[in-house]
Image (cartoon, helix red, strand yellow):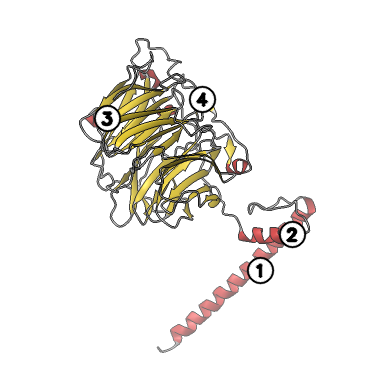
């Protein structure tokens, strides 16, 4: 790789190490679907892996500590009728995961606190809106219950999971298959990579493209695009000669790249994983047996090659642990969950330090699980940066609240339309009953009690009638 020498960096000597065999997850039949997603998602509690499933689609959810050989009969999340293509843990609730599938649906699941005891066929909510398979699902980084999905129908849909409804549908922006979608740091923009070789930066709430670059990479194979914390866009793709490339772009001027590097000649699509706290990008090629890492800086050549971690076995997919799931006492700066054909192997990246003290420079405050915004606030135009937490004493998970889905009442919509002419300021958003006070409340209560009494009498009389009819039937000579 013809990279320029690195400027002095504390990540120059990052030390990668695969864990011992007894800490791997063995005997897992990793999915064989030909789709370029990571097939694995991890958080501080669980590792989720898309697996082979007969007659539908499934993924496995294992508590992190449940390593070793996994029983063939281990329960799975198995509600999809077609293979699962992508999964993503909610950043604001470590027990909620979304999945996209070939059956054209997106499903959201609430995993029990200690993991699955029996297989889970019923999701909390099914999101239907795509006409072809759904290959990408990704949660909003700062707004609770906002989920983005992209399908092979070339449509991006942003959902409010709390109501089970589509808030934004982006059609006619992508003429071909969408390879990747990524939110920026505060979730105000998305960037997409498409089969038409264009990188687009989109404002989803205004439903407009604010920047795009044609032929960001000229090769025909899939591209990937992610946002960096300063708003720049980092891309991976292929040159016309099928060499793998990485590029850095400034959305304010997409004409010329900030930086482009040729890497090597290989077919594997490069999956980028980004750490916004340290500005390090890790590249994991599908089918590669290595993880390369780069530091992004403000000085030329902007993308600095750091090092490569190499193993013997090629990777089928890769999970990337959020910062709050790392062991700060061991100076761990990244942890990957590498998928083989039959197992999942954690790989730990550490920066060797002599001191046992907390290393402030390695662990600036990182995004915590608290969401600064609700879905309704985000759709109204508010933005919120991630709420940061310190990792000085390690991350202590709090209590996750259950995901509740409140379907909007169709009658409410009809009522609000009828009352719009008389009182345009009053609109009912959900079917929440209004709180009534004083004597009016007592009158309502009396009315309900009367109704209950009459229903009881009706049930009682019907029971007597049924008993009488049964008696008559038994006396008849059939």
Kindly state the secondary structure of the residue where label 4 is placed: strand
Mark nearer the viewer, 1 or 2: 2
Please tell me how crowded label 1 is: few (under 14), some (14-19), or many (20+) other residues with Cα within 10 Å: few
Mark nearer the viewer, 3 or 4: 3
How far across and down, in percent of the image, does residue 220 sit? 34, 44
Measure how far apart labels 1 and 3 are at the Cα level.
73 Å
Q: Earlier in the sequence, mark 3 or mark 4?
A: 3
Are circles 3 and 4 on residues that touch, CB within 8 Å? no
Mark 2 highlights which residue? Answer: 419
Residue 345 visible within the image: yes
Q: In the rendered view, would you say 148 is above or below 307? A: below
Q: Which mark is residue 454?
A: 1
Please give left or right for residue 96 compared with residue 240 in the image.
right
Q: Earlier in the sequence, mark 2 or mark 4?
A: 4
Q: Earlier in the sequence, mark 1 or mark 2?
A: 2
Q: In the rendered view, would you say 231 is above or below 424? A: above
Q: Earlier in the sequence, mark 1 or mark 3?
A: 3
Q: Which mark is residue 290?
A: 3
Mark nearer the viewer, 2 or 3: 3
Please tell me how crowded label 3 is: few (under 14), some (14-19), or many (20+) other residues with Cα within 10 Å: some
Measure how far apart labels 3 and 4 are at the Cα level.
31 Å
Are circles 1 and 3 on residues that touch, CB within 8 Å? no
Q: Quadrant of the N terminus?
A: top left
Please give left or right for residue 234 compared with residue 209 in the image.
left
How far across and down, in percent of the image, does residue 131 sit? 44, 58
Please tell me how crowded label 2 is: few (under 14), some (14-19), or many (20+) other residues with Cα within 10 Å: some
Q: Quadrant of residue 463?
A: bottom right
Q: In the rendered view, would you say 88 is above or below 131? A: above
Mark nearer the viewer, 4 or 1: 4
């Amino acid at each position: 790789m013809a990279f320029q020498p690195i400027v002095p960096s504390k990540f120059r000597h990052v030390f990668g190490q695969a864990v011992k065999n007894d800490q791997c997850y063995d005997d897992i039949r990793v999915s064989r679907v030909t789709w370029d997603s990571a097939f694995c998602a991890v958080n501080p509690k669980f590792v989720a892996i898309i697996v082979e499933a007969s007659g539908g689609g499934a993924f496995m959810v294992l508590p992190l500590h449940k390593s070793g050989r996994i029983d063939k009969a281990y329960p799975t999340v198995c509600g999809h009728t077609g293979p699962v293509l992508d999964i993503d843990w909610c950043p604001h609730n470590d027990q909620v995961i979304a999945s996209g599938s070939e059956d054209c649906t997106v499903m959201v699941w609430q995993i029990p606190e200690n993991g699955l005891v029996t297989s889970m066929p019923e999701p909390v909510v099914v999101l239907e809106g795509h006409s072809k398979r759904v290959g990408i699902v990704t949660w909003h980084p700062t707004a609770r219950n906002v989920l983005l999905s992209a399908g092979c129908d070339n449509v991006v849909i942003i959902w409010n999971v709390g109501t089970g409804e589509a808030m934004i549908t982006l059609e006619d922006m992508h003429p071909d298959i969408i390879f990747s979608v990524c939110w920026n740091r505060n979730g105000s923009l998305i960037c997409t990579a498409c089969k038409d070789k264009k990188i687009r930066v989109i404002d989803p709430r205004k439903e407009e493209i604010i920047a795009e670059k044609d032929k960001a990479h000229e090769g025909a194979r899939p591209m990937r695009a992610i946002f960096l914390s300063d708003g720049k866009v980092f891309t991976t793709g292929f040159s016309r000669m099928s060499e793998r490339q990485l590029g850095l772009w400034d959305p304010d001027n997409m004409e010329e790249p900030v930086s482009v590097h040729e890497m090597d000649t290989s077919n594997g699509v490069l999956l980028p994983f980004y750490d916004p706290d340290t500005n390090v990008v890790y590249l994991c090629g599908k089918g590669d047996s290595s993880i390369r890492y780069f530091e992004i800086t403000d000085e030329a050549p902007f993308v600095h090659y750091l090092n490569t971690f190499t193993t013997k076995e090629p990777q089928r997919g890769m999970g990337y642990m959020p910062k709050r799931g790392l062991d700060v006492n061991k100076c761990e700066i990244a942890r990957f969950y590498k998928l083989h054909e039959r197992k999942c192997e954690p790989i730990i990246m550490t920066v060797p330090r002599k001191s046992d003290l907390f290393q402030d420079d390695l662990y600036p405050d990182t995004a915590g699980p608290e969401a600064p915004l609700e879905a309704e606030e985000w759709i109204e135009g508010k933005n919120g940066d991630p709420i940061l937490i310190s990792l000085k004493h390690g991350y202590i998970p709090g209590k996750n609240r259950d995901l509740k889905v409140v379907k909007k009442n169709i009658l409410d919509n009809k009522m609000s339309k009828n009352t719009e002419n008389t009182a345009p300021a009053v609109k009912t958003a959900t079917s929440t009953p209004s709180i009534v006070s004083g004597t009016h409340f007592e009158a309502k209560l009396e009315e309900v009690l009367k109704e209950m009494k009459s229903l009881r009498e009706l049930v009682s009389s019907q029971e007597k009638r049924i008993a009488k009819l049964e008696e008559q039937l038994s006396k008849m000579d059939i």
